[in-house]
Amino acid sequence: MKRTLVVALALATAMPVITLPVAADAQVLTGRGAPRRSAPPRPRLSQAEENRLYDAQDLVMDLDGQIADIQAAAEAQGGLTPAQQAEITELTRRREEAQRTVERLEAKRG
């Protein structure tokens, strides 16, 4: 009797584990091998919009340079004059407007 019990125990522990798939496994496997959908292509900019983008980028760089020049001159003088402050305010407003144009067109370009 002992011998049959030992043999039965040995066989029970040596058998491979059998698992049954559950609903969660089926959910994970759903869609495997299906073609992936790519995002639709973004609209390209027209030639006029590209030109506007490049012009706005150039304007931002030019205005940054002008603002830096005025600030450097103000440091050499010891401070901004009211005229320089008004000019910096106007240049900053124009720069922000051009930067918004750049951001809008770059977002449309993708």
Image (spheres, helix red, strand yellow):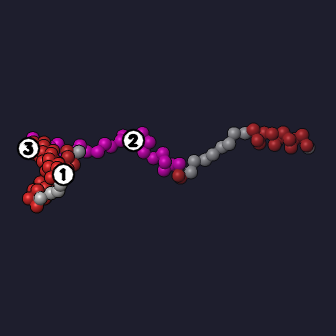
* Residue depicted at 69% across the width and 39% down the height: 16
Query: Residue 69: percent from the left, percent from the top?
Result: 14, 47
- Which of pointers 2 and 1 lies earlier in the amino acid sequence? 2
Distance Cα–Cα, label 1 vs label 3: 40 Å
Q: Which residues, given as a range, are shown in magenta?
A: 25-49
Residue at left offset 53%, top offset 48%: 25
Q: Please name the residue that numbered disc 1 is placed on.
A: 75
Observer-nearest of 29 and 46: 46
Disc with the residue nearer the chain's start (1 vs 3) = 3
Residue 27 seen in the figure: yes
> What predominant SS class does the magenta segment belong to?
loop
Of the 4 image quadrants, the one containing the N terminus is top right
Q: Which quadrant would residue 88 be assigned to in this image?
A: bottom left
Q: Nearer the viewer, mark 2 or mark 1?
A: 1
How crowded is the residue under tag 3: few (<14 C-alpha within 10 Å), some, or many (20+)?
few
Return the mark for residue 46. Answer: none
Question: Which sits in the foreground, 20 or 64?
Answer: 64
Q: Residue furthest bottom?
A: 82
For label 2, the residue is 34
Q: Nearer the viewer, mark 3 or mark 2?
A: 3
Cα gap from disc 2 to disc 1, whole angstroms: 65 Å
Q: For the residue labelled by badge 1, is the local secondary structure a helix, a strand or a loop?
A: helix
| Farthest residue, direction right | 1
Name the residue beneath numbered marker 3: 48
How many residues crowd mark 1 within 10 Å: few (<14), some (14–19), many (20+)? few
In the image, 9 versus 47, the foreground residue is 47
Measured as percent of width and height from the top left, residue 86 is found at 10, 59
